[in-house]
Amino acid sequence: MTVIPAETGDLGDILRIYSIAREFMKNSGNPTQWGDCRPAREVTERDILERRLYKITDGGRTVGVFAFILGGDPTYREIDGRWLNDRPYGTIHRIASSGEARGIFSAALEFCLKKCENIRIDTHENNRPMLRCLEKAGFRYCGRIITDDGTERLAFQRGSDF
């Protein structure tokens, strides 16, 4: 698998993958995290323009997508709990798979760790597949945060030398 920056021409594939991911979430007991419209098209377009959206390809096909944002995330300023450290970090957001390949999360994480060893991420408490990925990848639960839409998420962090 290869991770490369997404471009405007990839928007159709990316929106298709997000639609597949929304259905997967609904069918696996997590209907509210992304609902029917998250991530919004406008957010996806902005992620592309700001060069923080990446696509994962396998055999020339786009099979996954994620945003990776270096620097402080306003959503993570307040936490009901405690982050593992206050060092600079990167955040993985809006990760999704087409379902056509395994290892999307691992490929994204490997890419992100090359850019920053201190990674934060959040997910809905009903997102069991993501919770399993986070545990397997060595993320530690840090507490609860409130997202930009006012809903609660479980927050995790992974890094070295805590």
Image: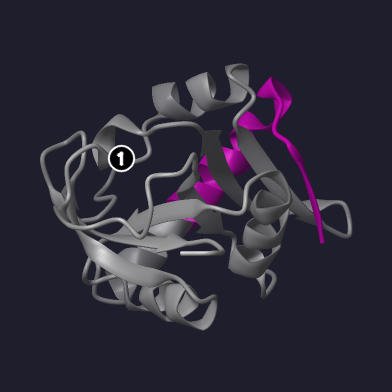
Q: Which residues are magenta?
A: 1-20
Residue name at image x 43 percent, y 53 percent: 120
Which color scheme does this rendered protein use? one colour
- Which of the 4 image quarters holds residue 59? bottom right
Q: Please name the predominant secondary structure of the magenta segment in the image.
A: helix
Closer to us: 111 or 12:
111
Q: Is residue 148 left or right of residue 150?
A: right
Residue 63 appears in the picture as rendered: no
Residue 133 image position (x, y, % from top left): 49, 76
Q: Position of residue 31 (x, y in %)?
A: 22, 62
Relative to 57, is 91 on the left or the right? left
- Does residue 80 show up magenta in the picture? no
Residue 147 vertical placement versus 122 (above, below): above
Q: Is residue 133 visible?
A: yes
Left or right of residue 13, residue 132 in this image: left
> Depth check: 72 or 18 in front?
72
Q: Is residue 2 located in the magenta-colored stretch of the structure?
A: yes
Q: Residue at x 66, y 55 (%)?
A: 113
Q: Quadrant of the N terminus?
A: bottom right
Check the image and name the residue furthest to the right.
59
* Residue 84 position by quadrant: bottom left
Residue found at the very far front of the displayed protein:
161
Q: Amino acid at mark 1?
A: Cys
- Name the residue beneath numbered marker 1: 37
Residue drawn at point x = 44 percent, y = 50 percent = 19
- Vertically, is 134 above or below 78? below
The quadrant in which residue 143 appears is bottom left
In the rendered image, residue 115, in percent from the top left (x then y), is placed at 69, 44
Question: Badge 1, how many Cα within 10 Å: few under 14, some, many 20+?
Answer: few
